[in-house]
Image: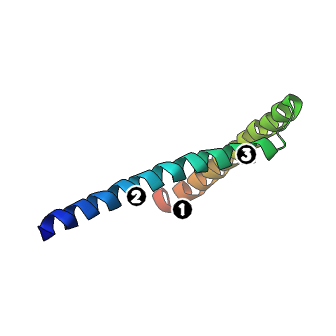
Amino acid sequence: MARESSSSSSEVRATAAAATQRVFRWSFFVEVYSELRKVEWPTREQVVRLTIVAIVLTAMVGVLLGAADLLLNYILDDLVVNP
């Protein structure tokens, strides 16, 4: 008889925990939506301009790293391979 009450109390606790988790998930998304409504989103022009800046800077860093790689490769070939 004692086993029946302990198993039913654990079932109740599990059900309560699941219900609490569902409420928490729902409230989380409600809060996320509320916060996203407060965000000041960039204009289309700002997005385009900043995207172009990011692409140009990425290309410049790529060229710089490529040049450094070629230079170091040339130097190390002369020092190590052909001493």
| Marks 2 and 3, how far apart at CA | 25 Å
Local secondary structure at mark 3: helix
Q: Position of residue 49 (x, y in %)?
A: 85, 34
Q: Quadrant for the N terminus, please.
A: bottom left
In the drawing, does residue 36 fall left or right of residue 83? right
Question: Which residue appears at 46% of the width and 57% of the height?
Answer: 81
| Marks 2 and 1, how far apart at CA | 68 Å
Q: Mark 2, residues whose alpha carbon is within 10 Å: few (<14), some, or many (≥20)?
A: few
Q: Which residue is mark 1?
A: 79
Q: Position of residue 3 (x, y in %)?
A: 13, 67
Mark 1 and mark 3 lie on one chain; the one further toward the N terminus is: 3
Q: Amino acid at mark 3?
A: Ser
Q: Which mark is residue 34?
A: 3
Q: Amino acid at mark 2?
A: Ala
Q: Position of residue 37 (x, y in %)?
A: 77, 41
In the drawing, does residue 29 fall left or right of residue 77? right
Q: Which mark is residue 17?
A: 2
Mark 2 and mark 3 lie on one chain; the one further toward the N terminus is: 2
Which residue ends up furthest to the left in the rendered image?
1
Q: Mark 1, residues whose alpha carbon is within 10 Å: few (<14), some, or many (≥20)?
A: few
Question: Which residue appears at 14% of the width and 70% of the height?
Answer: 2
Q: Nearer the viewer, residue 66 or 7?
A: 7
Local secondary structure at mark 1: helix
Mark 2 and mark 1 lie on one chain; the one further toward the N terminus is: 2
In the drawing, does residue 28 fall left or right of residue 46? left
Q: Nearer the viewer, residue 74 or 27?
A: 27
Local secondary structure at mark 2: helix
Q: Are marks 2 and 1 in contact (CB under 8 Å)?
A: no
Question: Which residue appears at 54% of the width and 62% of the height?
Answer: 79
Q: Mark 3, residues whose alpha carbon is within 10 Å: few (<14), some, or many (≥20)?
A: few
